[in-house]
Image (cartoon, coloured by chain):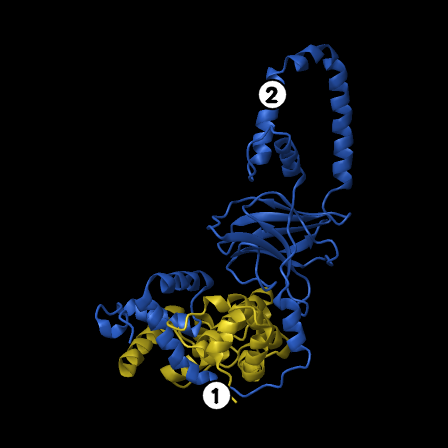
Amino acid sequence: MSPNGPAAGSPLPPEHRAIAAEYALGLLSPDEAERAAAQASANPAFALEVEHWRRHFSGLDRTSPMATLPPDLRSRIEAKRDGALAIIAEPSLETSRAAELRDRGRLPFSSAEAAADSRRRLFGWLWNSLAFWRLGGLAAVAAAIAIAVGLNGQLKQARSAPVLVAILQTPENQTAAVVNAFADGRTELVPLTTFTVPAGKVLEVWTLWDREVGPRSVGLLQAMSSSRLKLDNLPLGANQLFEITLEPTGGSPIGRPTGPVLALGRAAQRI
Amino acid sequence: MAVDLEQALVRCASGDHTALNGIYAAEGARMLGIAMRILKRRPLAEDAVQDAFVLIWRDAAKFDAEKGSAATWIYTVLRNRSLSILRDEGRSEPTDMPTGEHVVDEAVTPEQTITLTYVHGLSYGELAGKMGMPLGTIKSWLRCSLLTLRVCLQ
C-alpha cells in the first residue's frame, strides 16, 4: 500500500470519495472532470481513490462481448498516429497589418491586441510627423480620395455581405461570437466576448456538417480575436454546426473536440 | 500468450510501433465491444477505438505503473473518448438523446444504476429521465449509495 493510501490515515472526506467515484464512472461534467483530473495530479490520496474505483468498475469491462475489428481500423490508427493537426487559423487582415508593422520594427510585440495597438501608434506617428502636416495642402484632394474610397468600400461591403451567419452561444446563452461566411468562400470569426484560456491551452474552432464525417477543426486561437477560418475545401451550408472548445496547445491531438465546449451555434442563411 | 500491457505502454512511450500493434491485437476486440455498448452505433464505436489508440500512443509516457494498472489506464482512455463522442452526438443532435426511452417503473438498485452509467454511458440527466426522479434526488441517492459501497469494499 502506498504511504498516501487510505490506510496511512488522513482519509479523504466523503465528498471527495463520492467525486472520485463519479469521476471513475464518467458522471462528471467536462468542467468537473477537468477539476477532478487536476486534483488527481495534485493529491495522491485522491488519485489512489480514483484508481480504486476504476479497478472496481473494471470488472464490468470484462462482461463486454468482443466485437469483430474491421480490417481497416489498424491502418486508420497508423495513419492518424503520427499525424499532427495542421489546420491553423490565419490571422485576420487587421492583425496581418499589425504583424507587418511589427516586422518593420514599429511594434514591439505580437498579441491579440496588436491590431488596436497598431492603430493607436500609427495615429500617434502621423500626428507627430512633420512630413504628414506638410502635405496639408493636399488635404482637399485627400478628402476627395477618401470619399471615393469610402463609396467604393461601401459597394465592396454590399458585394461581400455574408451569405451564411452562425451565432455562437455559451452554455449560459451568452452570445460569444459570430461566424460569417462569404460568397467567395471566405469565413471569419468575429468575437463578442473573451474566454479565459489557461496556460497550455488554446481555443479550437470546429465545424460539423455531416455526422458521418465528424467535426473538422477550422482554426486555433490563443485568445478570442477576429480570425479567418480555414474552411477552404470543406462544404458549407445552412444548419452547419460551429463550436469553440478548449484544447491542449497545438489543438486536439485526435482531430475531434476533447475539451469543454465554450460556445456553439448553427449557421443560418442570410435573408 | 497474454501481452504484458505495462511493458507495451513503456515501449509505446519509447516510440516502438510494434508495441501499439500488440495492444491492438490483444485488447482491440474487447475495446470495440465496450465502445459499442456506450455508443450503440458501430462507426462511432470504431472512431472511439481509433481515437483511443492515437491517445494511448501519444500519452503512453504519462502512464505511471506506481499509480495504477496498465489495463485500467488503457480502458479509461477508451471510456473517456467514448463518453466524449456520446456527449458530442447528443449535443449536435438532441433528438438522438436516449432520455425517456424506457422509463423504469420498478425500484432500481444502486448496482443496476452503476451498470447503466458505466456500461451504457448514461449521464445523471438521462438517469433522472429514465427513473422519473428529479436530478438532485438521483445525484444524492447515487452518491450515498457509492459511499456505502465504498465502506463495504474496504
Residue A44: where, in percent of width, then height?
32, 66
Residue type pointed to by label 1: Thr
- Colour of chain A as rendered: blue
What residue lies at 37% left-to-right and 65% top-to-bottom? A40
Which label number is shown at residue A160?
A: none
Res B44 → quadrant: bottom right
The residue identified by callout 1 is A63
Q: Residue at x 47, y 86 (%)?
A: A62
The mark nearer the N terminus, 1 or 2, is 1
- Mark 1 crowdedness (10 Å alpha carbons): few <14, some 14-19, many ≥20: few
The N terminus of chain A lies in quadrant: bottom left
Front-most of residues B126 and A14: A14
Image position of A196 with respect to B13: above or below = above
Q: Disc 2 marks which amino acid?
A: Trp
* Residue at the image position 53 percent from the left and 81 percent from the top: B34
Q: Position of residue A245 (x, y in %)?
A: 54, 56
Q: Which mark is residue A125?
A: 2
Q: Secondary structure at mark 1?
A: loop
Q: How many marks?
A: 2
Residue shown at 55% from the left, 36% from the top? A113
**Discs 1, 2: same chain:** yes
**Residue at mark 1: chain:** A
Of badges 1 and 2, the one in the foreground is: 2
Residue B36 visible? The answer is no
Left or right: A94 with respect to A171?
right
Q: Is residue A139 above or below residue B61?
A: above
Q: Quadrant of residue B151?
A: bottom left
**Of helix, strand and loop, which one carries label 2?**
helix
The hue in which chain B appears in the rendered picture of the protein: yellow
